[in-house]
Image (cartoon, rainbow, N blue to C red):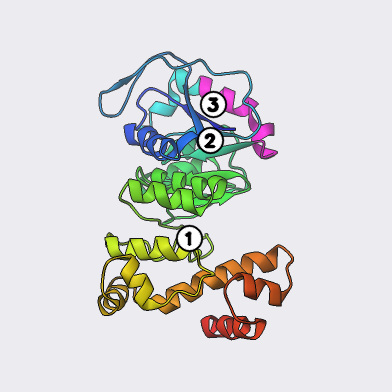
Amino acid sequence: MAVPVWFLTLPGVMTLDITGPAETLQLAGDAFSLRYIGPQESVPTSTGMTIGQLAPLPENLPDGSLLVVPGVADSSVAFDTPQAIAAQHWLMRLQPAIYARQITLVCICSGAILAARSGLLRGIHCTTHHEVIHRLKSAEPTAIIKENRIFVEDRGICTSAGITAGIDLALHLIHRLCGPQTALAVAREMVIWFRRSGDDPQLSPWLRYRNHLNPAIHRTQDLLIARPERDWSLEEIAGRVHVSARHLTRLFRQHLGISVRDYHEQLRLALARQRLQQGEGTEKAALAAGFSSSRQLRRALQRWQE
């Protein structure tokens, strides 16, 4: 079942704050269902474009919804309009569902200021565009504001920095709700790569080392990710991606700074950790990930912890 996504659309909304996350989520296929709502049916955007046929603000949102609050071109005045005040009161009514994590709040850029004015960021780790950090602090003094962050997620409330960071946050949500393969496919379709906030854990090997545009390396990574447990030889991999083994080794060193073997081993370790987290024994997890024994798995873990 598709996740319903609601874009709260106000006059003066930043066009890319809507279209960036919307296009990103739309590329995830049927995983998300996008809806556009607001206090009035038609609004001008930051670029002069008009967005029309907006649905009225619903009384409630279904559980599991994503509620996106985009930023505006001038947050010093746009959040004081009658439409913004109406949206603020509507957000306040949704507070219990948001705090209960029945609804995921997603603030893009200065949209965090409207959320703060609605009482939704009390004691929450959050961020916004660097030029309006002071307005966010003023709107909610108890908020724990993280400067120089791309996006922050705390207790089901997501906030992001300026404009294009909304795309990064949308990819993060696709990763969390649909899995790394779908997020990676969307990122590649958009010809962008993953960035993480300073508060996020290090990206797993499924998503790391993809910030390049080399097709031979991408083909290699797709091949290994599809079957990380397989005992791939360098020559077979190179043949599958139509380059020489020597050239493939050079490409990995040049673009990723690691060898093909090391990249493959990191994928296997990630798979083994997943199995261990699911409660499997060490020996079984090791074999499922392609290691010859639990002893070989432990040695690999030690290598990457050093």
Tag on residue 115? 2
- Mark 2 touches mark 3? (CB < 8 Å): no
**Marks 1/3: CA–CA distance:** 46 Å
**Marks 1/2: CA–CA distance:** 41 Å
Name the amino acid, label 1: Ala
**In front of the other: label 1 or label 3?**
1
Tag on residue 88? 3
Q: Residue 218, image x and y in percent?
A: 34, 61
Which residue is pictured at 33% across the width and 36% down the height?
A: 16
- Mark 1 touches mark 3? (CB < 8 Å): no
Name the amino acid, label 2: Ala
96 is within the stretch colored magenta: yes
7 is within the stretch colored magenta: no
Q: Residues within 10 Å of mark 3 (few under 14, many from 20)?
A: many
Q: Establish if 94 lies above or below 148.
A: above
Q: Residues within 10 Å of mark 2 (few under 14, many from 20)?
A: many
Look at the image and give the residue range highlighted in magenta.
86-102
Q: Residues within 10 Å of mark 1 (few under 14, many from 20)?
A: few
**Marks 2/3: CA–CA distance:** 8 Å
Q: Residue 57, image x and y in percent?
A: 54, 18
Q: Residue 77, image x and y in percent?
A: 38, 28
Name the amino acid, label 3: Gln
Q: Which residue is mark 1?
A: 226
**In front of the other: label 1 or label 2?**
1
Q: Establish if 231 lies above or below 47.
A: below
Q: Nearer the viewer, residue 27 or 74?
A: 27
Query: Quick one: label 1 or label 3, which is nearer the N terminus?
Result: 3
What secondary structure is marked by label 2?
Answer: helix
Which residue is pictured at 27% across the width and 78% down the height?
A: 250
What secondary structure is marked by label 3?
Answer: helix
